[in-house]
Image: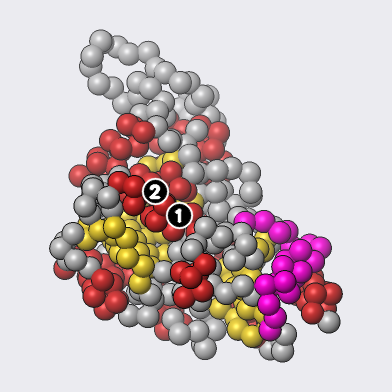
Amino acid sequence: MQFRTRAIHVGNEPDPRPGAVVPPIHLAATYVQNEAGVLQEFDYSRTGNPTRKSFEETIAALEGGTHALAFASGMAATTCAMMLLASGDHVVAGSDIYGGTYRLLHNVLDHFGIEVSLVRASDDPKRVAEAMTPRTKLVWIESPGNPLMSITDIAACAEVAHQGRAILGVDNTFATPALTRPLELGADIVMHSATKYIGGHSDLLGGVLAVRDAELAERLHFAQNATGAVMGPLESYLCSRGLKTLELRVREQSRTASRLADWLAADKRIARVNYPGRREHPGHAIAARQMDGEFGAMLSFELNGDFAAAKRVVEGTRLIRLAVSLGAVESLLEQPASMSHASYAREDRLAHGITDGLIRLSVGLEAFEDLRDDLDQAFADAMG
């Protein structure tokens, strides 16, 4: 089955009793057991829930995996992946990553004796190899990166990680499985903030991990069950519903994002546009190879102005909402320096290109002309 067909049908079989086309939401916290001490498929909803299982089956199929685990948030999913590590281990992470992931790596894992090295993985996978040590157990990247839209060669990083006997984790939130499937490129773990494109409507929190290896899935499930940050039944249902329109939404949003990127690049008030669909983007060739026909609906741009000017712009739009999330039907924008990446140490943020004048834009399903006009008036008011 093609992607959009699997998104509708895998994990969404009709309820056999009444024949309902949409499976019911199972709210039960616990389940009657046939025998004491004998394992069965469902016994307690932290360990497994039928509604969550349906969503997990669908996302595993869409990612080209065999197992998936759904969590209460994207950071809960990322944290579970980090639970594969032990004190004394080393992580190599891309420098263009979500601020919450940076915070977890530098302000939480360091308390447990886990060392982290940030590298520009998008420049050359050799940078990852150079940063690895005998203690490196995990390489963690995002492609496209957040917020600079850098493109990292996933297949090359997988080869480098595996040569060093490390596993490769990829945050695939921006691309979604509609455009990139890292497991098919050699990654071991794929993470999504399901809050974003998978849910798609700014009305849930969720995260997911997808894998191909059964032993790795078992290790992750043990950590998830032990710590308990699982996705609830209602959120699981909403994610399943969101997946049914995922490809349609992402491809339409990507087309609008491409037009906006071209318009912004021609505007003298803009110093730089970061969008992998533009041929000038340093990662365009890799993106064209590992993304499926479109280049995503996320872009960022840098003003010919300072922190204050960027702040005025993001506060001056009338249609586009000022908010830190992304991937929704409505367009959202934010200033990374003061919002999504404020947890970066300032020297790290600036060293890795996240400047004070950078603005990140998540393109929704509104008409291109309306988004263009809204940005234009915000620029005019903020910059003259």
Residue 350 shows up from this direction: yes
Tell me which numbered mark, 1 or 2, is placed earlier along the sequence.
1
**Residue 51 in magenta?**
no
- Per the model, the C-alpha gap separating discs 1 and 2 is 7 Å
Please give the residue where the numbered disc 2 appears in the rendered image.
Answer: 108
x and y percentages locating residue 383 in the rendered image: 79, 79
Question: Residue at left 28%, top 35%?
Answer: 222
- Numbered circles on residues, count: 2
The circle on residue 103 is: 1
Q: Nearer the viewer, residue 274 or 136?
A: 136
Label 2 SS: loop
Label 1, secondary structure: give it. Answer: helix
Mark 1, other Cα within 10 Å: few <14 / some 14–19 / many ≥20: some
User: Which of the 4 image quadrants contains residue 228?
Assistant: top left
Q: Nearer the viewer, residue 46 or 303?
A: 303
Is 347 placed left or right of 78 in the picture? right
Whole-percent x, y for residue 214 in the image: 22, 45
The residue located at (47%, 48%) in the rendering is 74
Q: What's the magenta region?
A: 304-324
Q: Are marks 1 and 2 in contact (CB under 8 Å)?
A: yes
